[in-house]
Amino acid sequence: MTDAGLGHKPKRSRLRKKITQVPISFRKNYGLLKNPEFWQMLPLLFICRFSDRDFAKSRTKIFVGTHHKAMTTYFKAVLKLMALGLGVRFEDISKGAPRPETRVFLSPHSRTPLAEIGPYRGIHIMRDPRDMIVSSYHYHLWTNELWVHVPDETGKTYQEKLQAAGKIEGLFMEIRHFIYFSRENLENWDLSDPDILELQYGDLMGPRRDEIYAEIFTFLGMTGRVHELGVRLMRLFEAGKRSKISATKPNERAHIRSGRSGQWKDELEPEHIAYIEQELGHILDKFGYTRSG
């Protein structure tokens, strides 16, 4: 068990969960309503509902699997609107299998038991674990997500412990949590599954992203107007177009702190890096990330 794993499991009513998400959603999508691309795209949502009858009849589920601080909220927004345009059910599911009637789903921790869901086509987004750890550390210092505010048996929440620890120990806390929560899942991830397209977070933030957007929806079996809708949604929800990040206030608290790959090199101390490579070096190797030495 880790510092983040201590405490009673939070009870989350649907109402409380929605209330908690309001400020996060506002911060993430503040720029959308000012973006003319958003309004220009809306008619396409309704056109698509009648333009891909084959998808509506198919049993194949489509999904995106992500990890914490690896484009989860981005793909949730894209997939929700994609499902709306297709006229099918969307589900955001952290564990277990989606409902039988669900056709489009997000697997935010890539833990879905794929063998239980029937035919599927999916996208898996991987980010350098070192960058995920750094990004999680900064995010957990201020987020209002419910679980970081649940007291443990000492009466302290994870966020309180993280804020009191200082950066060096705080990053060790995040490393331990990543090991506890993600290591086994990443060890067991099947990179050879022909029905899953493996993508790197850094590529989706780079100059080839438009090309990758097209590749994603082709792989998922989309054609014509539906393919166009998917690509336009990806462009629409890019961080700089949707969030409340200010170029003049780079330190402003925001859900999307930085999309830069390799930021761990500036944030982690040698002792952090040594510990990560001791515990997660095989994960770095598996997913093609170069070790520090």
Image (cartoon, helix red, strand yellow):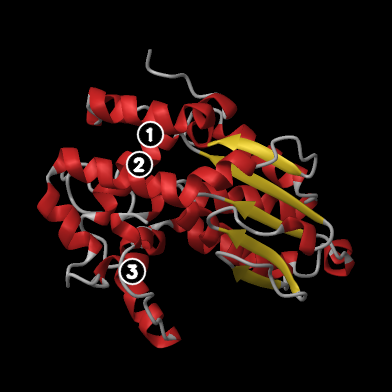
What's the amino acid at mark 3? Trp
Residue at x-position 50% and y-position 37%: 201
User: Horizontal placement of 10 versus 184: left or right?
Assistant: left
Callout 1: 10 Å neighbours few (<14), some, many (20+)?
A: many
Q: Secondary structure beneath disc 3?
A: helix
Q: Amino acid at mark 2?
A: Ile
Residue tagged by mark 2? 133
Residue 188 place in picture, x, y as percent: 64, 43
Q: Quadrant of the N terminus?
A: bottom left
Identify the residue at image location x=34%, y=80%: 19
Q: Residue furthest top?
A: 293
Are the residues at dot 2 and dot 1 in contact (C-beta closer than 8 Å)? Answer: yes
**Distance Cα–Cα, label 1 vs label 3:** 22 Å
Q: Secondary structure at mark 2?
A: helix
Q: Quadrant of residue 36?
A: bottom left
For marks 3 and 2, the one nearer the N-term is: 2
**Label 3 vs label 2: CA separation?**
17 Å
Q: Position of residue 44 (x, y in %)?
A: 66, 62
In the image shown, does 151 or 29 lie closer to the viewer? 151
Which residue does the image show at 40% across and 81% down from the upper left? Answer: 12
Dot 3 corresponds to which residue?
Answer: 147
Which quadrant of the figure has residue 149? bottom left
Residue 68 in sight here? no
Q: Which residue is mark 1?
A: 130
Nearer the observer, 51 or 251 = 251
